Amino acid sequence: MKEYGLIVVGTGAGMNVVDSALERGLKVAIVEEGPVGGTCLNRGCIPSKVLVHAADVIREAEEAAKIGVSLKVESVDYKRIKERMWDIVLTGRGEMETSLKQIKDIDFYNVIGTFVSEYTMQVGNETIKAPRIVLASGARAQIPPIPGLDKVKYHTYRTVFGIEEKPESIVILGGGYIGCEFAHFFSAIGTRVFVIGRNPVLLPHEEPETSLVVKKRLSKHAEIHTGTNTVKVEGLEGRVAVTINDPLERAERTIEAQHLLVATGVRSNTDWLKPEKSGVKTDDKGWITTDQYLETSKPNIFALGDALGRNMYRHTANYEASVVRNNLFEEHKVTLDLHAVPHAVFTNPQVGQVGMTEEEAKQGRKVMVGVSRYFDSAMGYAYGDEDTFAKVIVEYPSRRILGATVVGPQAATLVQQIVNLMYSETGTYAPLARAQIIHPALSEVLVSAFGRLRPANFEPEQHHHEHSR
Ligand SMILES: Cc1cc2nc3c(=O)[nH]c(=O)nc-3n(C[C@H](O)[C@H](O)[C@H](O)COP(=O)(O)OP(=O)(O)OC[C@H]3O[C@@H](n4cnc5c(N)ncnc54)[C@H](O)[C@@H]3O)c2cc1C
């Protein structure tokens, strides 16, 4: 049995806590089943954005005609796009591997780690133990029980980045953010794309108007079926045949394609980890449960990131790692603050969102909602993009921002301005109202949305004069 000061399971955001342990002179065991760097680096955010940006450039070129510039995309070098993608992944991975080897107080176990008893894990042939453990064990693709799926070759986000030749056609099962990002990429490079979503809308967790715009735009380039059941999947001489039941069509239909990508959600990795053997509780789906300090039901075992089964974004995992880093080692504990969790979906158009949707905000509060189209501000007009918008949701009468959505060019960057306001002292939009806003930048779309705030679920009081706070 080897004893350590800290065991970390998972090399995504889990790595963020390692330095603090080393600084305190602790020996650290790091346990990782897959490539170093976790999902974001190896098969998530980073490679997917290299692909999506290429798709953005293609669509921008194609759509430039409407602002009076005719461009033709001459060719798409799939190999070059992939090369650039692997470059950033392998460089990042290589740097991490080097530092894991060089730091003498780290032992790296490249195997599945499984708890065998309290604070004790089996890693390959060895048993390791530590008084402090961080579980950053993430999630993996969930495979739905569709008849025939287990008999065909399909991709998940674990393998899709490895497709060697530009696909001629692909069926994407799932209309969530992974489905919508890959639909954008593959359709833009000229692959015939079919998206099959069981939910009645694409991106069901977004505002309904976001789902509509994304469906409208992706439908120009891909065949999208929402509210659709997948009846069965069959293999056909190296191709796949997916039989669907779309309520808008009268009969079942079979779609044939070269590839199949299953992007129907994720499941917990705790079947590998067996945290219950160390007294760590999970919910009924296997996601690890914690208190507001991110400590699990077992003292000094903390969990963070996708392993918690909510807000599955790398920036949330990083933030949670900073909470864990503090609470592992400091007297003064910090509590988790999830009042303004942002995210983006890098599809066509780009989506940025933070906090509550309008529907969520209306539960038990008076809210004001303001919507502005990009087209209504000078730079938005210059972009020539008519479907795109910003929507802000504010509590009445406090003016505290509850949430926002931006759909259009630079949405992720624009919504960050609202995230930052939500982290200001009062959390209101007052700083934006006082600030000079660079004219005529896309930021004016946000100002204009706040300028259009109207009561959404209450009657405005008559003769009421609001005072600035
Ligand atoms: C295609 C795709 C695109 C994405 N795009 C974005 C994006 O644009 N922005 C964003 O914020 N997020 C994005 N995400 C989500 C983001 O990647 C995750 O939220 C983030 O990586 C979670 O980090 P983590 O540290 O919690 O888990 P992970 O990075 O998944 O790390 C967990 C690691 O633990 C290992 N592991 C688990 N159990 C064990 C065990 N028992 N023993 C040993 N090792 C184990 C796993 O192998 C894994 O490497 C994307 C995800 C995907 C799949």
Image: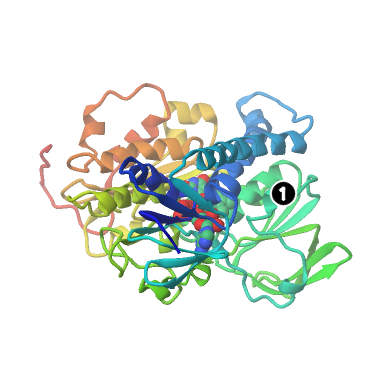
Judged left or right of residue 133, residue 421 is: left
Q: Camera-side residue: 469 or 301? A: 301
Tell me the quarter of the image containing the N terminus: bottom left
Place of residue 171 in the rendered image (x, y in percent of width and height, measured from the top left): 72, 59
Place of residue 182 in the rendered image (x, y in percent of width and height, measured from the top left): 64, 50
Residue ID at (32%, 34%): 447
Determine whether 300 is above or below 97 in the image: below
Place of residue 185 in the rendered image (x, y in percent of width and height, measured from the top left): 66, 44
Report whether the residue tagged 1 is closer than 8 Å to ligand 1: no
**Alpha-carbon neighbours of circle 1 within 10 Å: few (<14), some, or many (≥20)?**
few
Determine whether 185 is above or below 88 in the image: below
Judged left or right of residue 312, residue 178 is: right
Q: Camera-side residue: 73 or 388? A: 73
Q: Camera-side residue: 255 or 25? A: 25
Residue ID at (29%, 58%): 361
Q: Does residue 347 appear in this view?
A: no
Q: Does residue 306 appear in this view?
A: yes
Secondary element at image label 1: helix
Image quarter for residue 194?
bottom right
Place of residue 386 in the rendered image (x, y in percent of width and height, measured from the top left): 53, 39
Q: Say which residue label 1 marks.
A: 162
Q: Camera-side residue: 32 or 104? A: 104
Could you tell me the amino acid type at mark 1?
Gly
